[in-house]
Amino acid sequence: MKVITRYMFLFMLAGLLTAAAAHKYYVAVFLVEHVPAKKQLQITARVFVDDLDAALSKTNGKELYLATKKEVSGIDDYLASYFSQKIKIKINGREKAINFLGHEIEDDVLIGYFTVEAKGKLKDLEIKNTLLFESFPDQQNIINTNINSNKKSLLLTNDNPVGNLQF
């Protein structure tokens, strides 16, 4: 079942990425999985490099040249800071710190990896995600979750940047 879910997710992402080549869409996709054995949420973010570079440059007031030969040194520090400002997570009503693990580039997409401490039973998950909203008012952030074997999704927009899920 887990394999099927991953293939469905990849299929959906491929469709979004293919559609973006024909028409510019502002979409980022996040996968949030609860791993009780590690007492954490594991988060994977997929964001178009050019969109993220534009937002980072605007936020920092200088060109960072993300994923190019001219990329500034210490880019992970810029990414960690930006993501922690733009994504807030509450588990059972308590805000949790987001730990940025690193990133990789796949074609024109940045894949970011994060963890969030999640001890005990997860009953309520609140996510505020304003990633790229300052640069792209039409930005949509899709949050796919797998918590307690329940799969749920959120669509967060500039008009609705916060979502809450009950498990």
Image: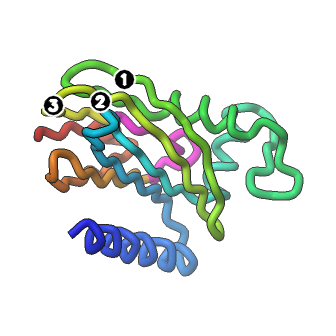
The Cα–Cα distance between marks 1 and 2, rounded to whole angstroms, is 8 Å
Q: Is residue 27 magenta?
A: no
Q: Amino acid at mark 1?
A: Lys
Residue at image position (77%, 32%) is: 61
Near-viewer residue (112 or 143): 112
In the image, residue 128 sits, relative to residue 137, either above or below, namely above
The residue under the point 79% across, 43% down is 64
Residue 140 vertical placement versus 122 (above, below): below
Give the amino acid type for the residue marked by disc 2 in the picture: Ala
Find residue 118 and name its label. Answer: 2
Residue with the mark numbered 1: 96
Q: Residue at x 78, y 36 (%)?
A: 74
88 up-or-down from 158: above or below: above
Q: Mark 3 packing: few (<14 Cα in 10 Å), some, or many (20+)?
A: few
- Relative to residue 128, is residue 154 drawn left or right? left
Question: Where, by quadrant of the figure, is residue 37 drawn?
Answer: top left
